[in-house]
């Protein structure tokens, strides 16, 4: 069983601060831009300054663990990462991630080129060098494996196994992050690594944007796992992991010119980076109880690196051109916050008696230490089942069952969301196939029920209690598992039952896909009432008397204003993405004053009379009717103003300013770029 062994850094402290390195890439603008000079410059090996946009005669100074200027070589950058590598040979975790706006040099820093290899190849080479330098007499045997994945549009995809499905992210009781199903390839040398890494890198999603010819459209994570096992008893085993992460860059879509699929990708990237900034804020806050790691796949994966057990280095890449000014400013603020984060490393150790063969058997997959427990439980269940003489039940408990359900649900969700337009979509066929499988399992469960009933009829009551009861309860769990997945959950408005008299009691339920289809059919048979766009949605309202409706609306408004992510997701038509957007909206703009149209009207809503979230895609935008009063204070903001403000508000991640900022400071923003040009001349 895995065991945490506390780590001391010599000064008797068991903590490790996130190390922050900033790298400024060389000037790459046009000659005209070059004449403008640079908006940021280094002062020494730790300090830099950037022009203060509020007052161009001043600069804002920052101090980091290391600052790398424009002439820094790849080797010098690697040297600032190298000190954390030895930890992974002693069962600890380490993580290096490159952060920064699009086009600032993250991929160049992490991957590099053939002539100028970046941190990833250098770190892997170094790990092999350290392992090979270990003396056999120390009594440990080392093995190294690699995994490589990308988070693309909130999906975890295995780059070593192209075409694989979205993988789940799990956490064991020791808070180790696990990705069941992820390919784990054993590597024995650097050239072996190279052989797998280069083709897998080509599987990563990249595309050309106005800012970057080859822009990463996903976050890429390379995982190197070093396991060392003692020759002699007690055969201690320590497993250390190194995460090397090239994040996708935050994007200002005014400048990238992104549209269609690129815009959707950009929305997913910006949203995950926004969650990352919330995680950092929460970690730095003394009052926040819950760190929102689970709000995005990226933060879930970085859970160990930020506020977790890893020794972490964050490389913040910035660009010197004026057009990147606000991105650079935001990135530096983010880096500044991150350096306050403290991690608590520990050695992850198991005693491997006689675990070596078992370990080898699981080589091909990320199983994680805790995975042994459910596995053992399954084995115990299966064994018990066989003793009970029930082959059907054994089949129902087979490991393939949950995966069928997981895949089915994931695929249905994908189809409901309109599928992935970028890649060929054969999901519907697959859903059919999986549904058939599910039906087969359900009919077997029914058959099994019958067998049980027949058996119970011939047995005496005492015997029934002794031998059949446990079996029966087990069976019901299995069939419940299947049914739970197939039935769509009710909505939380059911809590109305507490406050409403019985005769007016109304429970609004989230509709199943089938129910929705039926309703749609009905809808097509009946002409919609004149002027009513949203006939389906208003249908349920007309069945409830107005006081009940008001209470329901009030209740939902309450949830919108103070509900957790989970509560929001329980609302009709609100999925994970929309719930997160609502949380983001709330954070920026405060409470919803009235019943917002997007909640029930969803995409059919064409009303632009008030600023509202456009929740269809992952892109958040503001709409406004020219001339009508804005919801930002009392000031009238014309739509043209909003067009200018919107990219700053929504895309200048992670610098998210409160709404009043825009109303008060807007006029200053417009003149900022010209005022900035005074400095550094
Ligand atoms: N230190 C550097 N020296 C020379 N060229 C660099 C340096 N940093 C970046 N570049 C070049 O700048 C361009 C953009 O860099 P890169 O693709 O690494 O940016 P990025 O931050 O990864 O962008 P994105 O987030 O869009 O993927 C590339 O052509 C790269 O070769």
Image: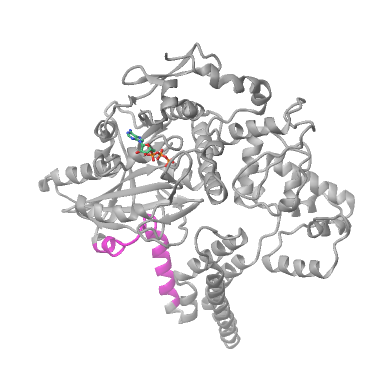
Going by the image, does 61 lie left or right of 516? left
Q: Front-most of 104 and 230? A: 104
Where residue 442 appears, x then y in whole percent?
57, 77
Seen as rendered, the residue at the extreme front is 31
Span of residues in magenta:
357-385
Look at the image and tell me in which quarter the C terminus lies: top left
As displayed, is residue 469 above or below residue 676? below
As displayed, is residue 197 above or below residue 587? below
292 is within the stretch colored magenta: no
Where residue 74 appears, x then y in whole percent?
27, 34
Where residue 426 appears, x then y in whole percent?
52, 68
Where residue 628 sits, quadrant-wise, is: top right
Q: Front-most of 383 and 14? A: 14
What secondary structure predominates along the stretch shown in magenta? helix
Seen as rendered, the residue at the extreme bottom is 458
Going by the image, does 591 lie left or right of 336? right
């Amino acid at each position: 069983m895995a065991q945490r062994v506390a780590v001391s850094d010599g000064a008797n402290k068991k903590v490790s601060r996130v190390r922050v390195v900033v790298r400024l890439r060389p000037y790459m603008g046009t000659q005209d831009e070059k004449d403008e000079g640079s908006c940021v410059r280094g002062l020494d090996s730790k300090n830099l300054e950037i022009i203060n946009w509020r007052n161009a005669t001043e600069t804002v100074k920052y101090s980091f663990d290391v600052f790398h200027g424009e002439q820094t070589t790849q080797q010098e950058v690697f040297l600032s990462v190298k000190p954390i590598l030895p930890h992974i040979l002693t069962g600890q975790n380490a993580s290096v991630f490159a952060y920064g706006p699009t086009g600032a040099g993250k991929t160049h820093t992490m991957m590099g080129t053939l002539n100028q290899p970046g941190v990833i190849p250098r770190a892997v080479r170094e790990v092999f060098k350290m392992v090979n330098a270990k003396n056999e007499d120390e009594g440990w045997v080392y093995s190294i494996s690699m995994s490589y994945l990308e988070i693309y549009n909130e999906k975890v995809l295995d780059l070593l196994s192209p075409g694989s499905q979205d993988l789940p992210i799990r956490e064991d009781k020791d808070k180790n992050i696990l990705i069941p199903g992820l390919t784990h390839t054993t590597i024995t040398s650097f050239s072996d690594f190279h052989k797998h890494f280069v083709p897998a890198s080509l599987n990563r999603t990249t595309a050309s944007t106005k800012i970057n010819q080859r822009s990463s459209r996903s976050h890429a994570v390379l995982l190197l796992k070093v396991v060392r096992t003692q020759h002699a008893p007690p055969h201690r085993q320590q497993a250390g992991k190194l995460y090397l992460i090239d994040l996708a860059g935050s994007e200002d879509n005014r400048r990238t010119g992104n549209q269609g699929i690129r815009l959707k990708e950009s929305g997913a990237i910006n949203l995950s980076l926004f969650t990352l900034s919330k995680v950092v804020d929460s970690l730095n806050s003394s009052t926040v109880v819950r760190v929102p790691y689970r709000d995005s796949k990226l933060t879930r994966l970085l859970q160990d690196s930020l506020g977790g057990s890893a020794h972490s280095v964050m490389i913040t890449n910035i660009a010197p051109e004026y057009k990147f000014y606000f991105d650079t400013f935001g990135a530096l603020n983010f880096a500044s916050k991150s350096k306050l984060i403290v991690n608590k490393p520990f050695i992850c150790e198991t005693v491997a008696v006689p675990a070596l063969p078992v370990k080898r058997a699981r080589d091909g997959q990320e199983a994680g230490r805790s995975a042994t427990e459910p596995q053992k439980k399954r084995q115990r269940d299966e064994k018990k089942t066989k003793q009970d003489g029930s082959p059907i039940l054994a089949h129902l408990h087979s490991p393939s069952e949950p995966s069928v359900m997981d895949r089915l649900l994931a695929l249905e969700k994908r189809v409901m969301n309109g599928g992935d337009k970028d890649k060929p979509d054969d999901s519907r066929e697959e859903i059919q196939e999986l549904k058939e499988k599910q039906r087969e399992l359900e009919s077997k469960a029914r058959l099994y029920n019958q067998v049980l009933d027949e058996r119970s009829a011939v047995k005496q009551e005492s015997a029934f209690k002794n031998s059949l009861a446990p079996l029966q309860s087990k069976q019901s769990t299995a069939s419940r598992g299947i049914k739970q997945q197939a039935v769509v959950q009710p909505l939380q408005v059911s809590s109305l039952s507490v406050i409403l008299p019985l005769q007016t009691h109304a429970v609004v339920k989230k509709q199943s896909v089938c129910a929705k289809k039926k309703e749609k059919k009905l809808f097509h048979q009946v002409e919609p009432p004149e002027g009513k766009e949203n006939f389906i949605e208003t249908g349920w309202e007309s069945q409830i008397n107005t006081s009940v409706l008001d209470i329901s609306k009030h209740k939902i408004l309450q949830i919108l204003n103070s509900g957790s992510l989970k509560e929001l997701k329980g609302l009709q038509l609100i999925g994970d993405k929309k719930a997160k957007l609502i949380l983001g909206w709330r954070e920026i703009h405060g409470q919803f004053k009235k019943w917002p149209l997007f909640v029930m009207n969803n995409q059919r809503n064409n009303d632009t009379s008030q600023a509202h979230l456009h929740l269809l895609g992952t892109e958040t935008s503001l709409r406004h009717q020219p001339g009508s009063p804005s919801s930002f204070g009392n000031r009238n903001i014309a739509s043209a103003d909003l067009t200018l403000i919107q990219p700053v508000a929504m895309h200048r991640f992670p610098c998210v300013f409160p709404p009043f900022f825009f109303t008060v400071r807007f006029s200053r923003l417009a003149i900022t770029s010209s005022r900035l040009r005074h400095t550094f001349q």
